[in-house]
Image: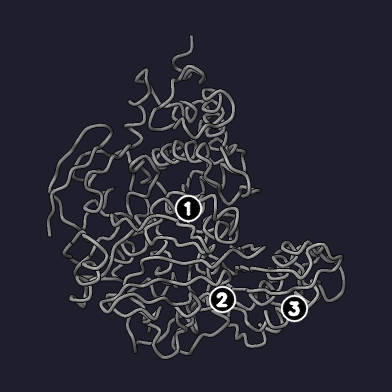
Amino acid sequence: MIPFDYRRAEDAASAVALVTGHPEAAFLAGGTNLVDRMKLGVAEPAMLVDISRLPLDTVDVQADGRVRIGTNVRNADLAANTHIRLRYPALSQALLAGASGQLRNLATTGGNLLQRTRCVYFQNPSTPCNKREPGTGCSAVDGYTRYHAILGASEDCVATHPSDMAVALAALDAAVVVLGPGGERVIPVSDFHRLPGTEPQLDTVLAHGELVTAVELPPAPPRSAYRKVRDRASYAFALVSVAAALELEDDDAAVPVIRDVRIALGGVAHKPWRALQAEAVLRGAEATDANFRAAADAELRQARPLGDNGFKLPMVRNTLAAVLRDLTGVPAPDAGAAGTDHPEGPDGPRGTGWEDTTP
Amino acid sequence: MEAEITLQVDGIPRTLTLDTRTTVLDALRDRLGVTSPKKGCDHGQCGACTVLLDGRRANSCLTLAVAHDGADITTAEGLAGRTPDGGLHPVQRAFLEHDGFQCGYCTPGQVCSAAGIIEEAAAGHPSGATGNLQTEGGIELTDAEIRERMSGNLCRCGAYANIVAAVRQAAEAAEERRGGAADPGQPAVVDSPTAASMPAHPEERP
């Protein structure tokens, strides 16, 4: 780790001024990702401006039903917040699916949004990486791609965004409140993170010195949920995750019709992936497993799997259908039926590259 | 850059001048000689460095000491001394009782984490294993809850089965001391409970 100057911020405006005035400065909050990257030699700030003691640590429910979450609210505290648990379960579930208990006690809301990819090549300074050192090439494209993108990637970068929380925020249509030298601006969370294109070194649309001060949630959707699929039962990054927020025309109908739905996918792209094609298929459609799968297929038409991650296509399909079934009360299909690639099926999915070949 | 900070470590104020690059873990081990928190991966993945930072479990390897000037830190060593009878913390006794370790390297982090989850569950903090997020109040630490909540503490000897049993016993004893249902008003860690309801350490048995 290179030496750095440490400053404790007096208030948000002076923190912004300090970082804006120093091209090599960075904000420090919980530090769980930044300090790790500094140890790895991936981040080398010359100055840290510590915002962790600023009083931006409350969850405020406003008169119009909106909720303002301060940037310093710990992941553990946001997940446990009674209002969030009751009204925005997708957000609690996503937070609780991320990291470990001791990390969630340190990690903050703003820091969670700004954490960087765990692509093994990005985290290893001895390998080429366009995100870490623009122009050096992408080691992952022809390398280990199990955790990499199937949607929206470029030939320069196939990394995925690691946050669970941000995927739920995308489905909940949240917005990020940012303070810069010129004042405050509010950015829809779906526009906050970028696709890699030819500038994968830029994760977000933030300018240097802009500070996330809060996240705002619109009034709660009637139903929401988050589901994560990973290589072990706990404490692992997502292979695939799905967040959905949903409203039915008539909650009591035998076959309910979907009035509105927002879906976001995690583990598949450089940013939380808002599944607009799937949403379009489902708006006004009956809540049936066949429609859920048709919606997933519509989204996945644009997917471009890499060498090791073709399994993510059926995984997205199954997880999306499972989340929407849970939210609408639609029963699971017969796992053995023809054309079903349900993961609990007797033989598992076929021809999708993820069969278990062990005897 | 150097900075002077004070940390309250296991009840004792310790003032030191350190390089701003120093993590809480390195400050404890290398500067203050408090070696119960262990350096395993040094990247927040193994949990061997877990301490109670201002009463909550945290990975001491991933946080800078300079950012925690004035903080109260309890290590596994300090957990022991904070019981009313000055003996081992009930979680530590349960680890001995159930043989919840082999080599012992991860154990200080495991016991700090276990002490933390008992308080977190009593305070109503849910986990990924909590089925119903719509209910409030203390959460019972079932085996599934314990496994999920302890997933940030790895044990390369694979003592997990006994660790779960030890944590379950400590959690049940804490619940008994609270008089049944977990009470968020009665923290299990800060005011460490009496060992009266815990089984005696094998070596202390009559």
| Residue A297 place in picture, x, y as percent | 71, 82
The amino acid type found where label 3 is placed reads: Gly
Q: Secondary structure at mark 3?
A: loop
Which residue: 25% across, 37% down? Answer: B9
Q: Give the vertical position of B140 relative to A5 (above or below).
A: above
User: Disc 2 is attached to a residue of which chain?
Assistant: A
Residue labelled with disc 3: A351
Q: Residue furthest top?
A: B206
**Left or right of A99, for residue A34:** left
Q: Which quarter of the image is occupied by the N terminus of chain A?
A: bottom left
Query: Which mark is first along the chain, 1 or 2?
Result: 1
For marks 2 and 1, give the CA distance. 22 Å
Please say if the residues under marks 2 and 1 sit with CB atoms less than 8 Å apart. Answer: no
The amino acid type found where label 2 is placed reads: Val
- Nearest-to-viewer mark from 3 and 2: 2
For marks 3 and 2, give the CA distance. 20 Å
- Mark carried by residue A100: 1
| Residue A325 place in picture, x, y as percent | 75, 65
**Left or right of A30, for residue B177:** right
Question: Are tags 1 and 3 found on a single chain?
Answer: yes
- Mark carried by residue A268: 2
Query: Which mark is first along the chain, 3 or 1?
Result: 1
- Nearest-to-viewer mark from 1 and 3: 1
Which residue: 63% across, 73% down? Answer: A263
Q: Secondary structure at mark 2?
A: loop
Q: Give the vertical position of A66 relative to A281 (above or below).
A: above
| Residue A151 place in picture, x, y as percent | 57, 83
